[in-house]
Image: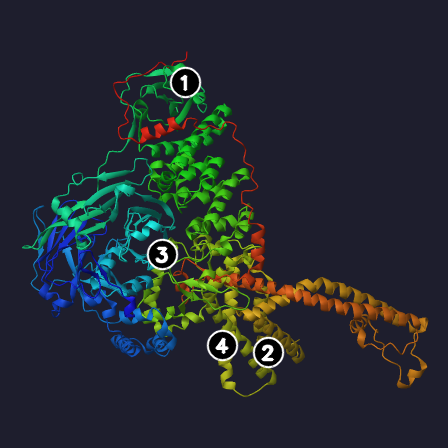
Amino acid sequence: MNETERTDYTTESGDLERGTSGVQTFEEKITYVAISPDGSIVATFNPYGFFITIKKVATNDETKIRFDRKKFFDKKPPNDIVLGWSLAVSDTINNDIGLVAISCITGKDMNPNGIYEINKYQIALIIVRRYIDHIKNLFVHLFFNSYPFIFYFFSPSYIEKDFDRQFRLSLVSSEGTTKLFKYSFKNRNNTNDININTNDDDNSIYKYRLGGVVGFLKNSKNSSKNVTLVCMNCIKMQKMSIELNDLNADTIILKEDCYILPENLFKELESVECAKFNWKYLLKSRYQEFLMVDTSDYQQIQSIEIYNINTSQLVNVFYRYCKEEDSLISRNHEPGIFAVSTDSRLFAYSYGDNIITIYLMESGLEVVSKKFNNDIYKIKFLEFIEDNEKLFIIEEDKESDVKFHVWLISGCLNDYFPISEKDIKLSDDEITTLLKYDDNYHNLTKANGNIVILFDNDEKSYEGQFRVISKIKINKSTFGENNTEKRHKFSTHELEPWNTNNGKKIHGRFLNDGQFLLITGQKSIQLWKSKNQNYENYDDFNNFENSNLVYILIDDNIEHEKASKFQIEDNMVTIIIHACKSLAYLYRHTDSINSKEKNQKFVSGITNIIKDFINKYPDYWKLMEIQYPLMAYLIYSRSFSLIKYVLFENAEKLHRPQQKYGSYPCYDNLKLNDDLGLQDSDLRSANDLELALKFCQDQDAVMLAYLLEYYAEHSMGHIGWMINVTKILPGLSKHDYANYVESLYYKPCFGKMKYNLPIKTFDTLSVSQDTLEVYIPLTQLISTDYSTILKYMKYKKIRDDLLPDICMVPLPNFTNYYSKIKGEIVKEEIFRKLIRKLTTSFWWIKVLIPPSYKDLNNKDFSPFLQIKKNKSAFFNIPSMESVIISRWRQTKNYCMIPLIFYILFLTLFSVLSWFYLNDNDKNKNYRLIMVVIFYYSGIYLLTVEIKQMLKYGSKYFTLFNIFDSCSIILGMIVFSLILANTFIKINGIDDESIIFATSVTALILWIEMLLCLRLFSGIAINIYIFGSILEKVLPFFTFMFVLIVGFGHSMFILFGFPSIVDLHPSASNLTGGTPDNPFDTPLDAILSTYNWSTINLGDYNYWPLKLFAFIASIILVLILLNMIIALMNDTFNNAKEDGKFGLLVYRSELIDDYERLNNPFFSESLYNNSPYICYYRDPDLMKKWIKKSQELKDTKLYSWFNESIDKENIIYDDEVQIKAWYKLISDNENQDSPSTPDYIDLDSY
């Protein structure tokens, strides 16, 4: 790192904020606080104190662990190298037992520039030491695991890799230390007792030589007895999976994994020489299992990477579009403020200004960006609370005071609430603590919707008090009535045309001094607002003629309590949800509705409620839609115009795809399956696209077209729009509306989607002639294991001038297995690795046994394997070609094993058949071994074919597969005959027959060898070019053959009767004897005609023969010869594309077969893939796609649908009145006054 690249920042007070100083020592008597991942346990600790205090948040139960900093180190380090400490506490993992981790951090742990970088010779010594530690392993294990080190040591190209510096630094020993302590709440007599671990010696149960920011990760449901600890410094991240031994709780079972930090994060830390700044940076960058990389300062488009530490994979990339005013805000390159919801659905981010952006984690799409204008100045802290319904915000105002706010993210209009210190009961000391958050960032922490503030730092006892904030009570707006004493009945069918029971009365009453009329029917609750003035009596109400429908709920089970006292909570959220439910109800009961015209008025009125709200408050609709599956109601109710309005007639991008209805937080409360009349098990895992596909019949298919067009159109800006398209593509390709797939393939996103991720390191796949260059971005954390580092040697940076031409396949996770299947496979992998360690010396056995197929359903495989590959469209798409190339390398590696077996089979057949046919006595001692190998190779290859036959059934029987099987069987039969005939003469089979059979078999086996070599692109393309040419010229050959047979037949007849037609050679030529008749037999006649130019008919003076010969020469020699030359030339040029097409089809079939195998050698690479596939956009190789894409660019997927005009279209006429309604519904003080009992008798009879 050059000195010019390092920057220092000074605060307003003049203190060095980011530079060469900033070392913190023991003299700063700081108390640290930590909260467990589930928010149930809080721990405090001061390195100068004597205890680590652990408390249960819910019960205030307390226990303590004795701590002695003098015994923390093997030898006391100098005070000037200690930067600080880090504290972490786990959830209770087994019978109220848990763990506490304490790490002592030194300056070198947080400053990579201060670490001495080791060279490759020192790395070699480290690796040798590791081998010495495992000297008990067999020699074979040592040999086969040494190749990564040998390759690294002698590969100069590796030294130039960007992550090589990190790898070198990661091998340097840390000066810091991390220790694990066990806590327990057992053996307490009453709530006032405190457990104290009173061991005199060091009571830690594990010690690790690494200092860094520590934290426990959230436990999965299946690992309640395990915890995962992460320790992260400025270079690497150590992940330790810990399990307490059931027999001895002081003994732990530990599995360690170490990863270097993401490249962009390391570069940011490397550019700084201030260790304290980096420490603070790392503290703010990790939350639970998520690691944020936010390093895009002062760029127009800011990229934010989120990694999952549990899976070591990139979760998603989020984009923030910076505005001009953002340049006025300086974060000094600190990371932004972020929060992740407890269900990991939502990601909230702030640059540190007064803007908060909400994203969907699964897609990376921005939902809404809210600017708080004068309400907030600088955001310092964010956290989702109360089941992710609220976002808690801590702000620093212009006077540097702390203020608190709550943002309701449900979509209600009144969504922002400033919170006073009294409301959350914070003392002055706690407020003072928060004011110093930037400096004392160890005093505030969060987890699982709980916020912990440390205060009252007692310098004598070195203990701190803390407060936990998890709930903040606010008064939500409620609209309704207080006086329900009088009710009036009336009878009318116009207000409930869907009600078939007209016997019961409908109740009605006025609200708010006659502004509203509330109708309570048998199956509905309706609220009407007068268009002009308040109602005076029932005669003033004429439903849609002079009133606006502002609320409606139609249901078979209207709650009597709700009917007796009408209340609307969450203002417009309730109104919109009930409107959508009502649309679904009306569609579900369409057949039972008597008056279609009256019913349509209500449909239009409900549609208007939704459209008007969207038009006025698009951001609130977006927030509602990510919390409630509103689009599902619109799809089910076949609200074509409303769906089109949401998707296309608003520039706000109102709809966001989500993968499962079951992931919506309000799914269970909504009872979506009851509203739609579908099975809960099917609906829970479905999404909007799958629901539209389910209803894809006749005109209903337009809903699917709307969604596909919408996602494809917006995906050019972010690949996250296509997450559901990836999932639905297999089913869509097999559907009756499969033409949607072909049209979708020619959307711009399938050939022009620019790569825009901040990751610039790629695995460049080897390319062949006339195929696209494919790149796989590095989206996983790299393990520091030397053999793993070797795998990433193939990764390299792409030049900046090439990046604009790099495009992405618009289908994220298209080749990846679903998480459930991956989880099962991971368990199998752990077991497999354990077995492999025990049987390392017998690794070759796995090669000698053909693998079986996975016992999985087709739906369990990747979408790429499930999709129906229509040869007329699929293989001509650049994105699909890139997908095939991306999967080919591992498939080819596996297919080399059967190829080697076949080479052995062919070679041994040739050698052994020659030996036995010649009765050669040489090398007799080795023949038996060769025979055994020959038969084993044949059995291996035949077993592979039989397994394929059993797996695929009738689909197996293709020309190539039949030829594969027959060639192997024929080779084994013929050699068996040779072998048997050598010892025992077989009756009826002579040597001539065996030699002929051997020669034919040898030819067939060599042809099969040629077909096996299709693994190599050059040979494969030529084979398919040959096949394409043969297919195209076959009609011409048929024409030529018939013509030759015709001429040959004529000549056979003519020469068959020479005495009758006086067909004799001339006298001058008789000296040499009578010439042979070239047309003596029909076969000779045909062959002679084919070789017409070699026949000499000049000896005959029969003029009809000369005329016949002249005509035949013109047709057969001149015309046909030139025709075939011209045809072959044109056919060869066209066959080049067919050769590439055949290559892709062949590779796709092999990939499909390989990924279904339960193969232990290469399976690991199948489940750790990047979700993204990229390729270099080469117009010369994409001409066909570009041409057709241009032709279809103005054609929408829904162009075939002619939307009918709604004759009963209803809109709000008076904007002033409706705006007043929105204001009324969102005000806090909007209850109907009990002193205004303005009721009227609505009895119509």
What residue does disc 2 label? 978
The answer to whether the residues at label 4 and label 3 have Cβ atoms under 8 Å apart is: no
What residue does disc 4 label? 933
What residue does disc 3 label? 299
SS label for mark 2: helix
Q: Mark 3: which amino acid?
A: Gln
Q: Mark 1: which amino acid?
A: Phe
What residue does disc 1 label? 541
Disc 4 or disc 3, which is closer to the eye? 3
SS label for mark 4: helix
Residue 496 image point, x, y percent: 43, 22
SS label for mark 1: loop
Q: Which sits earlier in the primary sequence, circle 4 or circle 3?
A: 3
Q: Which sits earlier in the primary sequence, circle 1 or circle 4?
A: 1
Quarter assignment of residue 813: bottom left
The answer to whether the residues at label 2 and label 1 have Cβ atoms under 8 Å apart is: no
Task: Estimate the spatial distance between the alpha carbons at disc 2 and disc 3, rounded to whole Å.
Answer: 77 Å
Say which quadrant the C terminus sits in. top left
Say which quadrant the N terminus sits in. bottom left
